[in-house]
Image (spheres, rainbow, N blue to C red):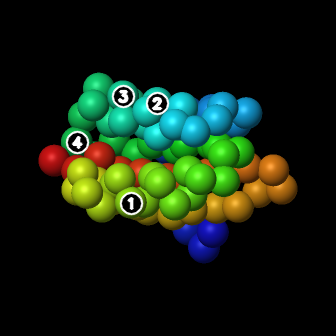
Amino acid sequence: MSESIFPDVTLDQRGAGCPGPLMELVSAIKDADPGTVIELQTSDAGSKDDVPEWLEKAGHELLAMEEHDDYWSIYVQKSS
């Protein structure tokens, strides 16, 4: 990742299967204020496709996706 992103909220969903990580993200975004940055940590391979697809439909911003050894960090910003 070229820039550091400092999330306001981190959701550790490593080990949770589909659709758990996405559902936790949806819930967190619903409760968050506009502009809130959320990091979703997930080991579910489907999330790296499902989350960006949902974000586009819902109108929120995908800031970055970072692959680690055994999970992904997906950084999201809630729109207004």
Q: Earlier in the sequence, mark 2 or mark 4?
A: 2
Verify CB contact (< 8 Å) between mark 3 and mark 2.
Answer: yes
Quarter of the rendering containing residue 68: bottom right
Q: Earlier in the sequence, mark 1 or mark 4?
A: 4
Q: Is residue 36 above or below residue 64?
A: above
Residue lying at 70% horizontally and 61% vertically, measured from the top left: 67
Verify CB contact (< 8 Å) between mark 4 and mark 3.
Answer: no
Which mark is on residue 27?
3
- Secondary structure of the residue carrying numbered label 2: helix
- Secondary structure of the residue carrying numbered label 4: loop
Query: Local crowd at mark 4 within 10 Å, few (<14), some, or many (≥20)?
Result: few
User: Which residue position is annotated with label 1?
Assistant: 53
Image-based side of 60 in relation to 10, left or right: left
Residue 50 location, x and y as percent?
47, 54
Verify CB contact (< 8 Å) between mark 1 and mark 3.
Answer: no
User: Label 3, label 2: how many angstroms apart (C-alpha)?
Assistant: 5 Å
User: Which residue position is annotated with label 4?
Assistant: 34
Q: Is residue 5 visible in this depiction of the protein?
A: no
User: Label 1, label 2: how many angstroms apart (C-alpha)?
Assistant: 15 Å
User: Which residue position is annotated with label 2?
Assistant: 24
User: Label 2, label 4: how many angstroms apart (C-alpha)?
Assistant: 17 Å
Q: Earlier in the sequence, mark 1 or mark 3?
A: 3
Residue lying at 63% horizontally and 69% vertically, measured from the top left: 1
Q: Amino acid at mark 4?
A: Pro
- Secondary structure of the residue carrying numbered label 3: helix
Q: Amino acid at mark 2?
A: Glu
Q: Is residue 43 visible in this depiction of the protein?
A: yes
Q: Earlier in the sequence, mark 4 or mark 3?
A: 3
Residue 80 location, x and y as percent?
16, 47
Residue 14 location, x and y as percent?
70, 36
